[in-house]
Image: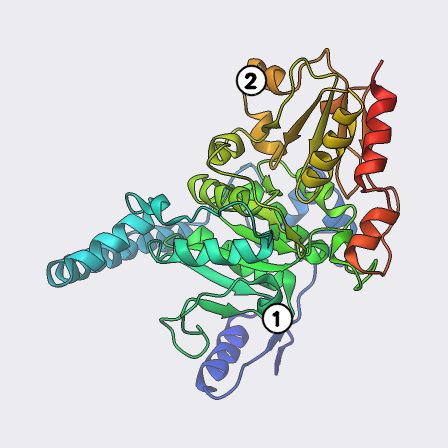
Amino acid sequence: MQIVEDGNNLAQIEAAINVAKAETYKPSFIAVRTVIGYGSPKAGTNKVHGEALGADAVAATKKFFGFPEDQSFYVPDDALKNWRQAVDRGAAFEADWKKLFDGYAAAFPELAAQFTRTQSGRRQAGWEKAIPTYPAGKEVATRNAGGEVMNKIAEVVPELFGGAADLTSSTKTIFKPGANFHVDPAGRNVFFGVREFGMCAAVNGMAAHGGLVPFGSTFFTFSDYCKPAIRLAALMRIHSLFVFTHDSIGLGEDGPTHQPIEQLMMLRAVPDLTDFRPADANETAACWHLALERTGPSFFALSRQNLPVIDASKVDVLGGVSKGAYVLADAESPKVILIGTGSEVWTCMDAKKQLEAEGIATRVVSMPSWEIFDEQSTDYKASVLPASVPKLAVEAGSPLGWWKYVGLDGGVVGLDRFGASAPGPIVMEKLGFSAGNVAAHAKALVK
């Protein structure tokens, strides 16, 4: 570690940097002592940070630095000359790089074409054909389906790159077969370590650079640590992907510390961030499809528990998910509409059976993405959620926000409390996510 006592002494700073460059075995740390607001009358106080200097203080600061006091905007000639020389140097560097790349393209045309394609953010033609379809029958956790879909996509999308924050075996986000990046620079598996924010910040850096479709993954409740980086991804509208698993109280025995309650609504509130909470393996495949096609950031909330699989031979899952919400199971002249996301879609399907056994025609809507549904036309949204039919939303998380879909006369089966430690099915039932409880709430809405 080196300390530069005078942060305005360029010679001292340069000397410290040269010493750091000479150290090739271990990291170097340079601490530079500076004074906030240096040169102004408010130097060394928080006032220079939290408020404008004011005309008198600006004039005094200009006098301190020897700048013309009668000019509102001033660039010293030496600085302007240096910047203009930098532009010329940059143009020369760019010309050299282009000449080098042209030679590379002549020797390796396919790799050069791949580089050009990935840098432009385009996918290989027909890449989506690699995405699998799951048959109805065997239940599949959406985290498992997500890992399988990701691997199939990776076969034709070599720019897909990422890993997890020390939870790869749980989030299923590992390329098989595939080398590990820290061992082999050609590897695509990244072990970020237990540093969720750092992981997501690194994902943003890769996305901003271009050429890769990067992702990071961890448990959904740990998205709290990721939030500042996710917000910046949305602010920059870059193609960062965030894969969260163990998406609800359904994860079970790990208890309230690991069971996300407010996280889904927290991230849905972020502008320009696409939310994906799929109900099954086929919706998960469709979500991956859309996440790679969209240009901005997206996040997935995937289940630990196994879930039934939608019969893709009877339902256009991709078409439905591409609209954000769709009618999964209908009835003639429905008297109530159940809206579910993720694992709760299946609770709605079971509740539909109970309601219809009592003569109450019921529609079930799967809504894997609020963001995408909100992008649809007014006519489409009204066709899925007609204003004349009462609606009940079912989601194992905070009920905030659902009222814009169910209306003030609708209802929400959600969570206004933290979870509990017990096997997942027991927690879900005890906290209200049973078909019987959903059916009871739905009947209360039917007039």
* Residue behind mark 1: 166
Toward which corner of the image does residue 385 lie, by quadrant? top right
Q: Nearer the viewer, mark 1 or mark 2?
A: 2
Q: Upstream in the sequence, badge 1 or badge 2?
A: 1
- Farthest front residue in view: 357
Q: Horizontally, is 110 left or right of 234 in the view?
A: left
- The residue under the point 62% across, 15% down is 382
Query: Closer to the camera, 170 or 67?
Result: 170
- The residue under the point 58% across, 15% down is 378
Q: Horizontally, is 10 left or right of 230 in the view?
A: left
- Amino acid under label 2? Tyr
Q: Is residue 75 placed above or below 115 in the rendered structure?
A: above
Q: Callout 2: 10 Å neighbours few (<14), some, many (20+)?
A: some
Tell me the distance, in whole angstroms, between the alpha carbons under discs 1 and 2.
42 Å
Rendered-image quadrant of the N terminus: bottom right
- Amino acid under label 1? Asp
Q: Secondary structure at mark 2?
A: helix
* Residue behind mark 2: 380
Q: Is residue 19 placed above or below 241 in the rendered structure?
A: below
Query: Closer to the camera, 117 or 396?
Result: 396
Q: Horizontally, is 418 left or right of 282 in the view?
A: right
Image coordinates for residue 191, horizontal then vertical, percent:
54, 71
Toward which corner of the image does residue 330 lie, by quadrant? top right
- Farthest top residue in view: 388
